[in-house]
Image (cartoon, rainbow, N blue to C red):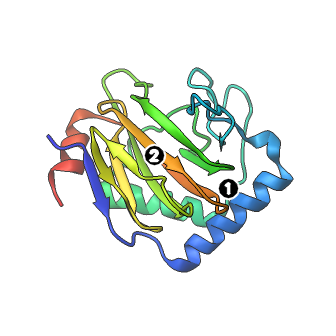
Amino acid sequence: MKKVRVIKEFISKKELDILNKWSLNNFRENPHYYMSANMDYDDPGSRVTTRLANNIDHIDENVFINYPKVAYNIRDRIRAKFNLWNQDHPPSFVDGIVNGIGIRDGYIFKHIDPIYIPETHTVHCNIISQKSDSGGVTIIEGKEYDIDSGDLLCYAVSDVEHEVTITRGSTNRIIWVFGFCVSSIKMEEMFWYD
């Protein structure tokens, strides 16, 4: 079964602008919402994320982030597109959403994400809302996915090795990750059809 799906132009330019503005303002005004992604061996702080440590449940820790309404609308559009209404999200994702910012040149090393809920697959549906000046290409099992801002890239992060090439330039790479813990049956439905 294939485990990657790309949907072009999943969100509008207006939605991209709102997500980017929120990301940069929120990072400036609420830096305590972000932690180092620790995914760059050479510069562990080059990427920051609202994702909590894998073993932390945001509800147990009383961590809540007031993401922009458009982020929730996009999450629900993804749920509707793939009929994910009854699928859980990773507990380290506040409301199933993560905002990540590349604050300087850096990369994400090759890795596989954990399975959070037994008998599910961890699936991320990513939208790059702002690309860096160069680089920042997602590589999944050796294949490059150089998606455009606004495209949706969904893949089973608990099943496939993935990484991101080094970003360069003065433009921050901004990504939105919508995470789901998906049953095997739902995985087939998500990735079987184009």
Q: Position of residue 161 (x, y in %)?
A: 33, 32
Position of residue 20 relative to residue 111, above or below, is below
- Looking at the image, can residue 143 be seen? yes
- Looking at the image, can residue 179 be seen? no
Q: Which residue is mark 2?
A: 165
Position of 174 compared to 5: left or right? right
Q: Residue at x 30, y 55 (%)?
A: 82
The quarter of the picture where the C terminus appears is bottom left
Position of 102 compared to 27: left or right? left
Q: Which residue is mark 1?
A: 67
Q: Quadrant of residue 176?
A: bottom right
Three-letter amino acid code at the position of disc 2: Thr
- The CA distance from mark 1 to mark 2 is 27 Å
Local crowd at mark 1 within 10 Å, few (<14), some, or many (≥20)? some
Q: Residue at x 33, y 61 (%)?
A: 81
Q: Position of residue 78 (x, y in %)?
A: 40, 58
Q: Residue at x 24, y 50 (%)?
A: 190
Q: Position of residue 155 (x, y in %)?
A: 33, 45
Position of residue 99 relative to residue 25, above or below, is above
Asked which secondary structure carries label 1, the reply is loop
Q: Position of residue 166 (x, y in %)?
A: 51, 46
Q: Residue at x 67, y 56 (%)?
A: 67
Q: Quadrant of residue 148?
A: bottom left
